[in-house]
């Protein structure tokens, strides 16, 4: 499926350069044969069978998708993208040992340049596995923004706000948060937004949480926070505050329709109901939860009963160890069935919804759906390989049989980011990120 | 990495035709740079850094692996390969509804031709994801053998023996088993072996189990059986026999060093110890167990403490829904950590051992290891893509970050089955299998 320039002749590199009006022919949308027409502003203008006849004259490029399944770009609602640099650095350890002996000492040596390269690698990996938007919390987020801007995908970026009940530290974190919000506004890239990132109820004081809630409200931006990942943090909160983490967050104004709560493994039924009432989005992170042995799966059924918007995230590469949202969809469905003892729980269509429309809603994005008038965040999944044969049910194959490598072509906001698995600059990113990761470990070992 | 004929010139197709003496240069073996020399009988004759100088004159073909990680071919110790045809046909259902309303009615319409094409598709999928040997139980196994023989991989094939305590049915099953054993002997293909396949303690009478044990002993072949997949079957066995399934199997002589017991979710500690004592191999099938909500993970720690040989299998595509052993390695490690509440359980090296050497031992194969004198069942995994960047720990990346699509090249018994992801006849298999799967569902719906 080499793209064809409408006036004839074939090109590869040119299509990556900027937005063009595009006609994608021969795809399947919701199981039906279709063509998709996208205008030069990146908006889907028409979807339907054989609309190629109508739009052929208007499209600058034509991509024959050869029967591929078209999906909305996947949305990863919880990650720490630059942690790609730590992939495989430490596994199979107890959480506290893993953090204190391995992750934190390495993170103490991180530079902005490291974060830039780690994010480039993460964006490359996301594009190659069909993700076009992500929700990120980490450090050196201006460097993250630089990398995301170059890679052309969508992101909501937050500075990981940790005050450990120290007022001086809190003041610094407030300043860092304000600085990032202003910086991202100055980029003037509608695909990159800021959020406020209070790390978790056990690492941020009530004063810090309240400040974050006010800051987010003032700027009308999102809140990205870890909630009830482990049993220990819930019990510690009960001891310290006489109430659970969700009650503490509610008291501080953190539970809003702009809030994404990651993990949520240990929520009780009343907390799920409060999430529904406040319009909070949950981000399910099953691979990370299993790898770090949280020992309880997010109560999907209670959140669903409370009409909570439930999305999906990979968490960082140090606890996953990849960013493949196809793998995450499958694992989400598997862990829910297994842990809650019900094979009918979290069906394939629900998993796909979590990874697309629910993710977009969680981040306040106009994507997550293939519809006329929506931005063209589009992923084409090959049907010419064994994971999609036979095709009794495309959504089942997408969730249970495919993985990220089944993705052939990716568009974000109408711009082609991957074509037939080619991403521009891939080798440079792999080399650059590999080098900084190696240097980072060397620096940590020398000190 | 186009293979180079030693006298010069490049070929693609010729290398698939038969065994050649091969020099694979520029691989990583156990983390170290190496070359591998394989003679024309398919045996690894030398492994080491820069041995290319010694062997260059002897090799008919040279494959430059471009820094790929070399692994032993993966071994899938429990599947029903032709069930690829049912991929995505029915999901998200209760076990009994799923079997009685969907799977059994479709299986009742299966023909030998269907099984042939389903197995071709399964072998293609296994080759594309690095599996070179599998343990199969199903029907129409002569057609399975025909497909495996054409595809060039290793298999141990058993007729699924189900007598439901009916003596007439038992006699037919004994005959079918004997017929398959004789047929496979007549093929005279050392890569294809037979086994006896008593389906499970709850579907085969004690008389049937005893006959299977004797038949396997007489022919010195393996036994392939489902054991304690669900809590219900264990409770039913206790009610019916006054003892658990493992005690029943032991009484009938089924527990031998040639026995592969699939699932094993509900084994208790004493049963694990008996497995160790009898030399039984377990086959862990975590994806299938999660999808069907067995609600308990195989007690890996007890089996390990009993020195049981613990291998890994995907189960059939109807409950997985693919045959990717990379995905299975990761899920095995994740489910053990999560369910048994210990993030140090089932480390990456242990997962890789399960999928290679333990699998080979379970099936009595001389493979599962890259060593001089061993058959060349070799898988090359690319290091030129994001899942292997950075490379702090190759085995961690293999287990936690890669998937089957990371595999570039596959050899079985010294013969090249895939080169740079090209498998001969791929399109014909996808088309053929897709067609019979479609026809099968149509036949089932018409009746």
Image (tube, coloured by chain):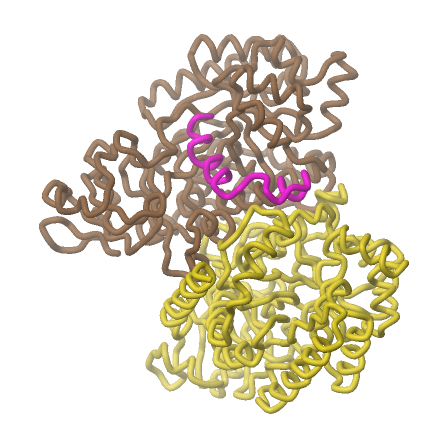
Chain colours: A brown, B yellow
Instruction: Tell whether position A347 is magenta.
Output: yes
Compare residues B441 and B395 and report the one nearer the observer.
B441
Q: In this image, A410 relative to B95: left or right?
A: left
How many marks on residues?
A: 0
Determine whether B178 is above or below A226 in the image. below
Quarter of the image for the N terminus of chain A: give it. bottom left
Q: Position of residue B191 (x, y in %)?
A: 59, 82
Residue A315 at x, y = what percent? Answer: 56, 36
Magenta-tinted stretch: A336-362
Residue at the image position 60 percent from the left and 42 percent from the top: A287
Q: Where in the figure is residue B86, as x and y percent of width and height? A: 50, 60
Q: What residue do we see at 73% from left, 34% from top? A: A96
Q: Is residue B248 visible?
A: yes
Q: Residue furthest front?
A: B447
Q: Is residue B420 visible?
A: no
Which residue is found at the position 68% from the left and 83% from the top? B175
- Give the answer, above or below, for where B249 lies relative to A72: below
The C terminus of chain A sits in image quarter: top right
Vertical relation: B96 (above or below) B438: above
Residue A419: in magenta span: no
Q: Foreground residue, B147 or A141?
A: B147
Main secondary structure type of the part rendered in magenta = helix
Q: Quadrant of residue A67?
A: bottom left
User: Is residue A254 placed above or below B90 in the rendered structure?
Assistant: above
Residue at image position (46%, 36%) is A353
Residue A275 position, x and y percent, is 58, 19
On screen, residue B81 versus residue B224, left or right, reads: left
Q: Nearer the viewer, residue B284 or A130?
A: B284
């Amino acid at each position: 499926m080499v793209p064809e320039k409408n006036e004839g002749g074939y090109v590869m590199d040119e299509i990556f350069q900027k937005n063009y009006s595009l006609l994608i022919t021969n795809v399947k949308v919701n199981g039906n044969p279709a063509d998709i027409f996208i205008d030069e502003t990146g908006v889907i203008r028409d979807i339907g069978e054989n609309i190629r006849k109508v739009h052929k004259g208007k499209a600058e490029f034509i991509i024959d998708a050869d029967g591929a399944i078209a999906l909305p770009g996947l949305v990863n609602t919880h990650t720490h993208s630059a942690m790609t640099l730590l992939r495989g650095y430490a596994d199979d350890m107890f959480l506290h040992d893993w953090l204190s002996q391995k992750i934190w000492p390495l993170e103490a040596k991180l530079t902005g340049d490291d974060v830039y390269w780690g994010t480039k690698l993460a964006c490359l990996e996301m594009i190659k596995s069909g993700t076009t938007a992500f929700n990120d919390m980490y450090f050196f987020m201006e460097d993250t923004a630089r990398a995301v801007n170059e890679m052309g995908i969508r992101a909501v970026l937050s500075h990981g706000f940790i005050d450990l009940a120290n007022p001086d530290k809190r003041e610094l974190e407030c300043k860092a948060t304000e600085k990032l919000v202003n910086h991202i506004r100055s980029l003037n890239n509608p695909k990159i937004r800021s959020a406020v990132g209070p790390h978790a109820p056990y690492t941020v004081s009530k004063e810090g949480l309240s400040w974050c809630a006010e800051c987010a409200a003032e700027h009308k931006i999102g809140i990205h926070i870890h909630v009830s990942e482990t049993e220990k943090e819930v019990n510690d909160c009960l001891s310290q505050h006489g109430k659970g983490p969700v009650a503490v967050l509610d008291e501080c104004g953190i539970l809003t329709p702009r809030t994404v709560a990651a993990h949520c493994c240990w929520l009780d039924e009343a907390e799920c109901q409060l999430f529904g009432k406040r319009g909070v989005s949950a981000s399910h992170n099953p691979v990370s939860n299993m790898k770090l042995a949280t020992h309880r799966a997010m109560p999907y059924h209670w959140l669903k009963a409370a009409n909570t918007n439930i999305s999906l995230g990979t968490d960082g590469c140090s606890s996953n160890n990849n960013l493949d949202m196809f793998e995450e969809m499958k694992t989400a469905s598997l862990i829910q069935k297994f842990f809650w003892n019900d094979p009918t729980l979290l069906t394939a269509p629900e998993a796909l919804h979590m990874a697309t429309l629910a993710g977009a809603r969680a981040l306040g994005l106009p994507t997550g759906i293939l519809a006329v008038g929506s931005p063209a965040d589009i992923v084409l999944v090959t049907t010419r390989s064994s994971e999609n044969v036979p095709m009794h049910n495309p959504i089942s194959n997408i969730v249970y049989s495919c993985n990220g490598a089944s993705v052939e072509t990716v568009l974000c906001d109408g711009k082609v980011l991957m074509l037939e698995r080619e991403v521009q600059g891939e080798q440079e990113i792999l080399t650059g990120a590999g080098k900084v990761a190696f240097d980072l470990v060397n620096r940590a070992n020398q000190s």
